Image (spheres, rainbow, N blue to C red):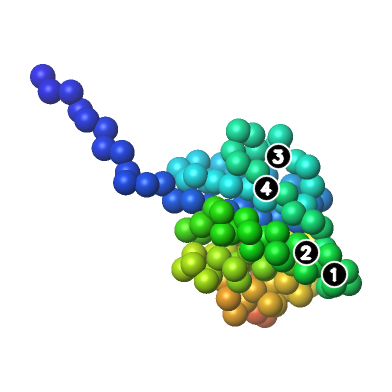
């Protein structure tokens, strides 16, 4: 009787999962099981690599539109992470750093998904508005928001 030979795929997809700290990171952790078949690199603003160990973890400076200089430093750090990882796919639960990761990764032909925070129940966040033109898929966690935007709704991660 012949033994079945397992055929190993030529290469697993590299996913860069990016989230700001706090609730954005908590929502990303809810998505971890979806990445089982991929080589995943996580990136966030806080020292939370232990949450996803032994997966590679990258940290960058927390910044937003109100902290312009920090945002510039964060953008350079995110660009460096994207350059090192060279993801096939970027998945983000926001906010500004996720948008930046999508923009930089698109330069290398990466596909992307922006999942807007569950906190945005009435309208898309500013980052989601910016990402909508660049992300391959924009997802909201509220059916009401999907009904009045071009975002899709597939349920909530919380």
Asked whether the viewer can see residue 58, the reply is yes
Q: Secondary structure at mark 3?
A: helix
Q: Which of these two is toward me, 16 or 125?
A: 16
| Category of crowding for the residue at label 1, using alpha-carbon neighbours closer than 10 angstroms: few (below 14), some (14–19), many (at least 20) | few
Q: Earlier in the sequence, mark 2 or mark 4?
A: 4
- The mark closer to the camera, 4 or 1, is 1
Say which quadrant the N terminus sits in: top left
- Residue 82 in the image, given as x and y percentages of width and height: 59, 59
- Distance, label 2 to label 4, CA atoms, is 15 Å
For the point 49% across and 44% down, which residue is it? 39
Q: Which mark is residue 73?
A: 2
- The mark closer to the camera, 3 or 2, is 2
Do the CB atoms of the residues marked 3 and 4 lie less than 8 Å apart? no
- Residue 140 in the image, given as x and y percentages of width and height: 66, 66
- Distance, label 2 to label 1, CA atoms, is 6 Å
Do the CB atoms of the residues marked 2 and 1 lie less than 8 Å apart? yes
What residue is shown with label 3?
49
What residue is shown with label 1?
69
Specify the quadrant of the image occupied by residue 24: bottom right
- Distance, label 3 to label 4, CA atoms, is 8 Å
Q: Earlier in the sequence, mark 3 or mark 2?
A: 3
Q: Is residue 119 left or right of residue 111?
A: right
- Distance, label 4 to label 1, CA atoms, is 20 Å
- The mark closer to the camera, 3 or 1, is 1
Q: Earlier in the sequence, mark 4 or mark 1?
A: 4
- Distance, label 3 to label 2, CA atoms, is 21 Å
For the point 46% across and 68% down, which residue is it? 109
Q: Which mark is residue 58?
A: 4
For the point 60% across and 41% down, which residue is it? 56
């Amino acid at each position: 009787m012949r033994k079945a030979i397992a055929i190993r795929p030529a290469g697993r997809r590299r996913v860069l999962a990016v989230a700001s700290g706090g609730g954005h990171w908590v929502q990303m952790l809810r998505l971890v099981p979806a990445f089982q078949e991929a080589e995943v690199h996580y990136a966030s603003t806080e020292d939370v690599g232990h949450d996803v160990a032994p997966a590679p973890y990258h940290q960058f400076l927390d910044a937003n539109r109100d902290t312009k200089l920090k945002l510039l430093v964060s953008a350079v750090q995110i660009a460096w992470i994207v350059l090192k990882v060279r993801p096939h796919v970027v998945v983000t639960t926001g906010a500004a750093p996720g948008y930046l990761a999508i923009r930089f990764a698109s330069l290398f032909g990466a596909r992307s998904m922006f999942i807007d925070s569950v906190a945005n129940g009435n309208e898309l966040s500013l980052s989601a508005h910016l990402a909508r033109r660049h992300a391959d898929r924009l997802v909201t966690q509220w059916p009401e928001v999907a009904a009045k935007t071009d975002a899709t709704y597939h349920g909530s991660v919380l």
